[in-house]
Every structure is written in structure tokens, then in C-alpha cells.
Amino acid sequence: MSVALLVLPDFLLIAFGALLARRANFAAGFWPGVERLVYFVLFPALLFRALATAPLAVSDAVPFVATGVAFTIGGIALSALGQPVCKLPRDVFAACFQCAFRFNTYIAIAVAGRIAGEAGLALLSLLIGVLVPLVNVAAVAVLARGRPTHVGRELARNPLVLACAAGLAWNALSLPRPAVAVRVIELLAAAALPLGLLAVGAGLRVRGTDLPPRAIAWWNGVKLLALPGLALMFAKLFGLDAMETRIAVAMAAVPTATSAYVLAVQMRAPGAPVALLISTGTIAAAVTLPMWLALAG
């Protein structure tokens, strides 16, 4: 099966979510509720299960994690160049800054599972546990603009970070896995990806802001072209095997997370430019993501 066909079901679910949000007569709070359910319950169950049950030697994954950290730092640096290139107002730049390196966890997990199964999910879950704090600290640091923040407290309560830490601890301590509890977690995890992808589609917005085309091109170019290129370069530099390389490149090549919009609004920055970047990047990723996966081979 070609790479494009491999990820086609995931993007069809995103498109279906966009259609449902515009045509189905759901209550106003339906889709935000779905996204909260996925983020706080279903996705943590999936990440915990992947790490708690995988035959994963964390020490052997150091080059893989180093690759993720390296390409993320590269994306942060390139994103900072967007201000002199695009000359945006300070608050608009602060909101857009995060769009070059934050990643859509829903799409990343879906793709990792398709290309590498349970082993790929476990590796990606480990990378999520490391990169979630890094990207959040970078995003908040620019958005804060001298205001007092509680980044450490928010990270300590982040459900994805907690789930990854719990899964790793459970695995390392070889704790028992009661059959009933395992089955409940499996059922929750199974619901995470379809609902998460539908929620991504429901959140797509391509109107409502006058963000200049050069800014759209810059941040989407960094996220969808430069970042996966860096991932591929560092994967070769650190000697990753074929599966690790594909997972790292997939993580770098997915579009920006919808949580970037939420963070911008919470920190009183303009949300519309971020929504536009997320939406245009997600649409473009339908083409660029299969391309990078094919190059990662």
C-alpha cells in the first residue's frame, strides 16, 4: 500500500469532522466537549497503554528522543525568524510563533499506529512525553510578555505528560495489569483516534483574519517542510533505524495542534491568525505528510 493511501483514512475522518460541524445540527458545546473528552480521558488512556505494555528500553531510545528535541529546537529558532521576515504586530507574532513547532498529537498517533503498529505507538508516546513540556514552555515564554505565569504547574497537570510518566513507571516497575482494568483502558484508547480526528476537522477555520500571505507561507513552510527535513537530517546523524526514522519524521511533519489556538486565547493573544494557520496547515499536510513519509522510507 502506498504511503498516501496509508494516511488517507485519517484525513478522510478529518474531512468528515469538518462536514459534520457545518451540516449536522449539534449543540453549540458539542465539539468542545468532544475535544475535552479526547484530551483529558481518551488520549491519556491510549498513551498510558502504549507505554505500560511495550517492551521498551528507554536507554536505547536516547538517540530517538535526541532527534525529536533537536528538530523541535530547530523549529523554535526558525519560528523566531518569522518576526523580522513578516514584520507582524508583537501580539500577532507571539500567537503565531508556536505554530511552527507544536504538533497535532491526534494525527501523529494515528499515523504512527498505521506505519509501525504498537511498537511505533510506544516510541511516539515516549517522544510526546518529552516534547510536550518543551513546546509548551517555548510557546508560553513568548506569549507571556512579562506577565506572571505558572508554566510548571500547568505542565505538572498536563494529562498527556502525566499519562506518559505513569505508563513509563508502570512498565519500569513491571506492575501487574488486571484484566478488567486493561480491557477498560483498551476500550477508551480505541475511541481516542476516531473522535480526535473528527474533532480536528470540526475545528478547521479558513476565514476571519487578515494574516498576510507571507506569514501563512512562513509558518506553514517551517512546520510542514523545514521541520520534517530537520528530523530526517538528525535521524541520519544520530543513526536511527528505519522505524525510528519514520516515526520521528511523522512527528515533525504533522500539522500544528489545535491547542495552540486555545493557549493563544487564554493568554489574551489574537486567536484568529492561529486558527487560520492550523487550518491551512492541516489541509496542506494531506499532501506534505505522505511525501515526507515516503522520503523517510
Image (spheres, helix red, strand yellow):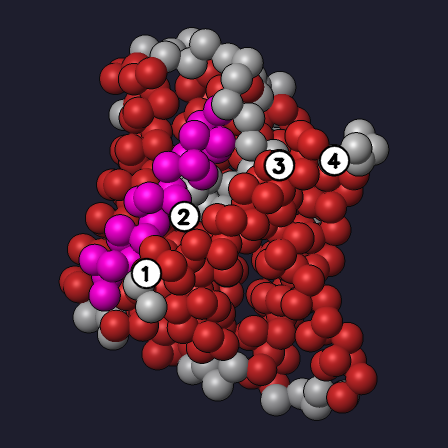
Which sits in the foreground, 192 or 58?
192
In the image, residue 74 lies at what x, y percent? 28, 43
Provide the residue span drawn in magenta.
Answer: 276-297
> Residue drawn 34% across and 56% down?
4
Quadrant housing residue 16: top right
Question: First in sequence: mark 4 or mark 1?
Answer: 1
Q: Are marks 4 and 1 in contact (CB under 8 Å)?
A: no
Tell me the crowding category of disc 4: few under 14, some 14 to 19, or many 20 or more residues within 10 angstroms, Cα based: few
Q: Nearer the viewer, mark 4 or mark 2?
A: 4
Residue labelled with disc 2: 254
Q: Are marks 3 and 4 in contact (CB under 8 Å)?
A: no
Amino acid type, label 2: Val
Question: First in sequence: mark 1 or mark 2?
Answer: 1
For the question of whether residue 46 can be seen, the reply is yes
Q: CA separation, marks 1 and 3?
A: 25 Å
Q: CA separation, marks 4 and 2?
A: 27 Å
Question: First in sequence: mark 1 or mark 3?
Answer: 1
Amino acid type, label 4: Ala
Q: Which mark is residue 19?
A: 3
Q: Nearer the viewer, mark 4 or mark 1?
A: 4
Tell me the crowding category of disc 2: few under 14, some 14 to 19, or many 20 or more residues within 10 angstroms, Cα based: many
User: For the view shown, which residue lies furthest in the front direction?
Assistant: 23
Amino acid type, label 3: Leu
Is 127 above or below relative to 222? Answer: below
> What element does badge 3 sit on?
helix
> Residue drawn 56% across and 73% down?
50
Residue labelled with disc 4: 24
> What element does badge 1 sit on?
helix
Amino acid type, label 1: Val
Residue labelled with disc 1: 3
